[in-house]
Image: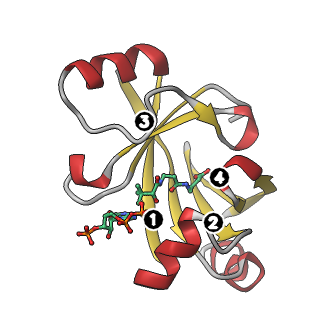
Amino acid sequence: MTKKINHIGVAVRSIDASAPFYRDVLGMVFEGTEVVAEQKVKVAFFSVGESRVELLEPTADDSPVAKFLEKNGEGTHHVAYEVDDLVATLARLKAAGVRLIDEVPRRGAHGTRIAFLHPKASGGVLTELCQGGGH
Ligand code: CMX
């Protein structure tokens, strides 16, 4: 069901301040930025092989990423796995008693459909499942 790691989300206060480390120091390929209004974040993607790092900058004080930064400071925010059929995967996880944040897919960056599992369901790692989009 899980095909690969699509991306690792990293919470940052400023994409502009953090981007040079990924682009210039690590030499990753900058793929662009996008505002994901539904999640109240601006994101920037840097590709590495088949996967990416997604920098997440909050666009509002009540963004989940703003709350994360306030509590933890900058750092790893979530791991996103790509699946073939997100709706079927969510149904299967729900039937298995896994605590879901999203029971139905939401819109993510690049036209993907995404859903989060609660970090308490996955050993303290906020887990995103995603399907489709322009990646
Ligand atoms: N990783 C691991 N644990 C996390 C976490 C994270 N990113 N965010 C919160 N937690 C933990 C908290 O530390 C807390 O643990 P304790 O109870 O042990 O202290 C617990 O989860 C509950 O946290 P909370 O602060 O009480 O609850 P929040 O209101 O902050 O909600 C969460 C947390 C995960 C449910 C919420 O952030 C959420 O719904 N996230 C999904 C959406 C999202 O993160 N969007 C941004 C990315 C969008 C994108 O990639 O496009």
> CA–CA distance between discs 2 and 4?
10 Å
Ligand 1 within 8 angstroms of badge 2 C-beta = yes
Instruction: Name the secondary structure under disc 1.
Output: strand
Residue at image mark 3 = 4
> CA–CA distance between discs 3 and 1?
18 Å
Residue at image mark 4 = 39
Residue 74 appears in view: no
Instruction: Name the secondary structure under disc 3.
Output: strand
Residue at image mark 2 = 56
Who's the residue at 74% across and 51% down the image? Answer: 36
Q: Are marks 1 and 2 in contact (CB under 8 Å)?
A: yes
Decide which of 53, 109 is in the foreground and name it: 109
Tell me the amino acid under the disc marked 1.
Answer: His
Who's the residue at 63% across and 25% down the image? Answer: 132
Write down which quadrant ligand 1 falls in: bottom left
Q: Is residue 10 above or below residue 1?
A: below
Q: For the residue carrying disc 1, how many other residues have a C-alpha within 10 Å: few (<14), some (14-19), or many (20+)?
A: many
Residue at image mark 1 = 77
